[in-house]
Every structure is written in structure tokens, then in C-alpha cells.
Image (spheres, grey):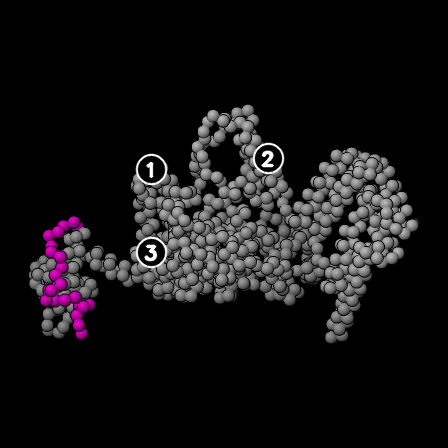
Amino acid sequence: MARKVTKKKAQSKKNYTINVIGLVLILMGVFGLTQGLTGLFGIFWANIARFFVGDLFILLDIFVAILGAYLFAMGKMPAISFKKKIGGLICFVGFMQLFGAILFPLKQVSENFIKITVDHVSFDLTHGFIKSTAFNGLIGSAIYSATYRVFSLVGTYIISIMLLIWGSMIILEIPFQSLVNFVNLLGKYFYDLFDHSTDAPKNVTKEKKPKPAVKEIVPDLFDSEPLAESEPLSFDEPAEKPDEEDENTDLFNQDYLSQDYPDYELPTVSELKPTVQVKNGLNREELKDVEEKIVNTFRDFNIEVQVTGASVGSSVTQIEIEPPHGVKISRILGLSDNLALALANRDIRIEAPIAGKSRIGIEVPNANPTPVYFRDVWNEFSQIQNEQNILEVPLGRDINGNVVTMNLVKMPHLLIAGSTGSGKSVSINEILVSVLMMARPDQVQMILVDPKKVELNIYNDIPHLLTPVVTDPKKAAGALNQAVAEMDHRYELFKQTGTRNISEYNKNILKSDDEMKILPYILIVIDELSDLMMVAGSEVEQAVIRLAQLARAAGIHMIIATQRPSVDVITGLIKANIPSRIAFAVSSGVDSRTILDTNGAEKLVGHGDMLFHPIGATSPQRVQGAFIATEDVESVTEFVKRQGQPDYDDNFDVSIDDLSDTKKVNESEDQLFDDALNLVYEKESASASMLQRYFKIGYNRAASLIDEMEAQGFVGPMNGSKSREVFLLKIDRYRYQKQENSSETNLEPPNDNLKQQDPEKEEV
């Protein structure tokens, strides 16, 4: 207790000292800015500042005053990374050089820069006034003198501008490749401008082409993706490339599809409410304290590790350590509980090794996580996305703050698991809203299954739906089986056209004269698989497995989510055919191994913290999922609903029981069934002995035929010694339907005045 009080007093004394320093800096800045009103002290301090930075002393005084105000108000030094301090120093050197290169030639000074600057300031300091030009001070004149002697005036200008650009890129964290991209694009733009304005023949009337979008003319300056190497430009014989379709171009983005929705507008980011930027995480002192605790913990077990870096993410901070040679990774992993004890945090996760590095990462949850908002992620994603991939959606940010995306076409299906409150439903909403903001209804259609009845009902009546949001598990099984039928139908179309997948088929339809419809993608989202497995387990599992195995080429993709990733819900066949997984926080390592085949998900902190394991990845990637509020989802869905009405397909709104009944009616196992039913219709009586006499069959087969007629509602149950009741109207309807399907018209339409009526219409 006494130690705590002593530590608190020391901290209070330290804050008091910083407050006093801040007050002194405020006074110095104010006196320097008002030197004409504060007497000799103000003039003295102004001349001291002029001695070092010259005529830029006003900017120095403003900086000193602002720094003092921060220290006085906060009681601590501002948390500025070492990298940004270096960037600021580079900008300062470049600015001082540039200022000297402007002032010295203006005053016709070409040598002895340091001596002249010192003489001017000393004269003003001695006489107590500010009249002479101080140029860029002692520091600036020394820097300018060195560069001027080596590079002359023009070289100094070039170096100054380069230093300013370099320092600004470090401060703003702009990748160097972005500058290269910008210069290349700028050069290409001016070349195209020069080419079209000088070399185009005036007597040739060119066919007008639609103007490209602004995004294509002025690409994002901060795109960190390197440009593909282009062919060298020829100034001798410039020629235009013919308008050819790229083999990998997704035709869903072409204008021909907009004929179904000519006035359709995609939602923009303005439909999302503005967010407030909050920067939490660990500051420099807290990070240093965590690093020391980690090093000391390993030292207690005779392992000398070295901290090589740290990445402060939104929800966790990853400390990179380098173990000594000869130490097994298993020893490092075995100390996770000891690290959790030392850091007073049980959710410590060790990544060994870090992907692409020969380092081990120790992930420590932040006490105050930084929220990741969908609007901010979307703004950054829209700058780097490939417009051809309408099913590429953002998930969130990784530990380094980079946007993590997911292409559903490449997945091709996704399995999501996580306990209640882990962020599973928010992630599904984020994916669906992303698709709505990129795709029209003729590009992507959806089947949404929500057995919980409260998660996805907000998407009802959007024009992308093939059927209203399915909440009945039996209807969900029916919808999945209809999706299988749609998949088989698409493969028949591929077979007829000689194509292999949906992209080739759509290109073939576009080039041909056939009036066949373009096939859209179909996205199936199941929010809770366990409810479906309990009600219609075998039907759901069979449909999911068939879709997972074959639906990729047909353009049908699934997202399946569950709270309980147990083996009776995520069966072996389902898991084997859905290789892409997302695991949110789960309750145990067993659940983590069920979904990811490895531990780790039980160490997640919840609220969108996930492990993303796409197809082809060697290890899962930790991602903080983006948060999208319900108000934003409502805003986007309402905007989409105003663009058009849904065109539901009744084939998808069917229960699995209805499908079974239809199959029973249309496909009897016994070839004598129709003949036996005709005999019952003619005799208006039904018995096994009658069928035995007429068809010369055994009793078992005859009884089976009678039981099948009873199951399908053509005859009534046994009624003691009386004969079974025969429902002639229903048999008549069945016979007429069979004849109509076989293109025969020998029967008259069913007569509703038959003496025996349908049992469903009989009055009790």
C-alpha cells in the first residue's frame, strides 16, 4: 500500500513539473510573438529565436506556444512516433534550405552566409530592436552554405523540394510506390493529351466513345499497388488498340446488363453516417512497459529474446520477438500462460512464426480498442478495389491497419463460426451491404435464410432477393434444394453452349444472336446452420454438400454461419467442401479446431475480432472486423428498395415436405400404380384382393399399391368391414394432369360434380 502511495506521489510530481514547463513555453511563445508590446524581454527572446531560425522565428514562437499549451493541459509529452519525428526533421531541413535559397539571392548575398547572418542578428541584439534581415538563422545558413557550395542554387532548390516531399511522405505514411504510380500516370496522361491534340487527323470523323468515369481518368494517388509493366511508348507511330474484351473481364459491369434496370443507381458512401476518428491503443510508454514485461518473463525461464518491432492494431498489439538460436518454438508456446500472468491479460495469443518473417508474434489485447467503422474501411477499399470483382468485399483491418478484402468468387464458399456477441451477424451485414453497394439486381441475386427471424428481416423486399427472407427451416431446406436444381439447370445450359463456367457462358451469350438471358451470380446466406440441421438435417446437408462441390462454376456461392461449431452441425463433408473459414471468439479450443483445424479462436477478444483463413492460406490472419450500425444497414436497404421491386421466383418458396409430396405424386416406384389407380377409379372401390385378381400379382405388392394410394390421398383408410372410400375427383385431377404432361388429350377435364369429392373439401 505504501509503495502504491509513493508511486502515485511521484507520478503527480512529474505531472506538476510538466505543467510548469508548459506554462513557461506558453509565456516564451507569447513574448516572442508580441515583442513590440512586451518590452526588452520580448525583443531579447525574439532575437534569440532569430539567431537560430532567422526570420522564421514567428513560426517557432507559434510552435512553442502550442507545445506549451499541450503540456500544460495534458501533463505529458505528445505521443509522436519516432518515424514521424524523423519525417518532421527532414521537412525542417528542407524548408530551411528552401527559405535560404529564396532570401540570400534576393538580398544579393552569394558568400559568407553564416557570418552575414550572425552579424545582422548580433547588431539587433546589441541595440535592442528588430530591423535587420536575419535570413534563415544560424541553423539555416549553415545548411544552405553546405548545399550551395556543393550543388549551387539550382541544386539547392531541387534538394529542398525532394526533402520536403520525402519528409511529408514519412509523416503522412504514404508509400513510396504511390509517388512512382502518380508520376507514371501523370506522364501517361500528358502524353495522351499531347498525342490526341497534335497527332489526330482533322479530316477523319471518329466514332464518339462514352467518356470514362472520373475514377478511370484520375486514379487514387495513394494506391499502394504497383503498376503493371506496360509496353514502351512509341512517338513515331502511335496507334489505338482495338476495343477487345479482356479474357478475365467480368461482363457484369458492362452497359448491356443495365437494360433491365436503366435508372438503377448504386448506393454511395453518403448513405452511411459520418464517423468520429478515435485513436486509442497503446502509447509509447505503455508499449515499452509491455515489451519489458515480455522480455523479463522469458528471462525468468532462461530464454533471452530480443524485441524487433511492434504493430499497434485496433484491438490488439503484436510484439515481434526474435528467440535465440537453439530454442524450440514449443518452449515459447508453452509460456503463454506465464505471459498472460505477467501482463495481467488472459487472452494472449502467440503466432509462431509470423507469416513471411522469421519472428514470433505475441498478440496482446489493447485495454482501449480503436473502433473500425465500415464507412472508413469502405472509403479506403473503394480506392483500391478492382471494379471487375463485384463480389469482392472488405472485411476490416489487420494488425498493421491495412484493409483486408475477400473475393467470394475465389473463396468460393465461406464458413463462419462464433459465439453470441462475437460479431458474427455484424460481419454478415457488412458483407451484404458491400454487395448491395457494388452490384445491381441483374448482377447478383440472393437467397437469405434466417431461422432466428430477427437478423436478416431488414433485407426483405430488396430487388436482389429471389425469395422473401426464409425463416422456416423446412422452407429453407426446400430453397436449398431448388438452388441445387438451378445449379443443374445452369450446367445444362453450359453443356448446350459448350462453355465451362458462368463467365464464359455470359460472354458467349453476349456474342451470339440468341435471345437468352445473362446469368447473374446467386449468393446464399445462412445465418444459423444448427437450427436447419435440427429440423431437416439430411436434406440440408445433402443440398449444402452438392452446392459446395459443384456450384462454383455455376456462379452460386454460399456463406454459412453458426454459433455452435460442433461436429454434428459442421459435419465432415460440409467442412471438407468449404475451405474458406472465419472464426470469431469461441468458448473453447475444441470449437476453434473444429472451424479452423487449429487453436487460437478461443483467445479472441470478441466484438469483431476474427481469424480469417481463406482458401490457399497456410495460416489464419487476425483481422478486426468493420462495424456497421443498424441505421446504416437500414439506410442502404431503403435506398435499394426505392430503385425497384423484387421479382420473386415461386420455385424457391416451397417446403421440403411439398417437394417430397410432389416427388411421390409424380414418381411412383411401382410401374403398375397408374393402371391400378385407373382400375380403382372405374370400379369406385379399392382393395388388395381386387388388384390381385386383375393384375395377377401377389398380396404384398397389391397391399403396397393400396397403401401408396392412401398416402397420396386417393383412397381413404380402412373402415372396418366396409370398403375404403375412393376420392374420385382427386384421382380425376391426377389422371388429367398426367395426360396433359404426356401431351395426350384423351380425358375430359376433371368434373367437380362427381359424387365423391376431394377429402380436403368435404365438410365435417
Q: Residue furthest front?
A: 37
Q: Looking at the image, which residue is at 12% across and 69% down?
A: 724
The residue that mark 3 highlights is 648
- Identify the mark nearer the N-term, 3 or 2: 2
Q: Which residues are magenta?
A: 742-764
Which mark is drawn over residue 572?
A: none
> On screen, 553 above or below 590?
above
Residue at image location 68% in from the left, 54% down from the top: 307
Q: Position of residue 102 (x, y in %)?
A: 77, 40
- Residue 747 falls within the magenta-colored stretch: yes
Say what amino acid the circle numbered 2 marks.
Gly
Q: In the picture provided, is 7 more to the left or to the right than 134?
A: left
Task: Tell which residue pokes out farthest to the right in this image.
Answer: 126
Q: Nearer the viewer, residue 319 or 467?
A: 467
Q: Nearer the viewer, residue 280 or 414?
A: 280
Picture coordinates of residue 383, whole percent (x, y): 54, 47
**Which is more N-terminal, label 3 or label 1?**
1
What predominant SS class does the magenta segment belong to? loop
Magenta span contains residue 303: no
Residue type pointed to by label 1: Ser
Q: Report the Cα–Cα distance between label 2 and label 1.
A: 40 Å
Alpha carbons under labels 1 and 3: distance apart: 28 Å
Residue nearer the viewer, 175 or 258: 258
For disc 1, the marked residue is 512
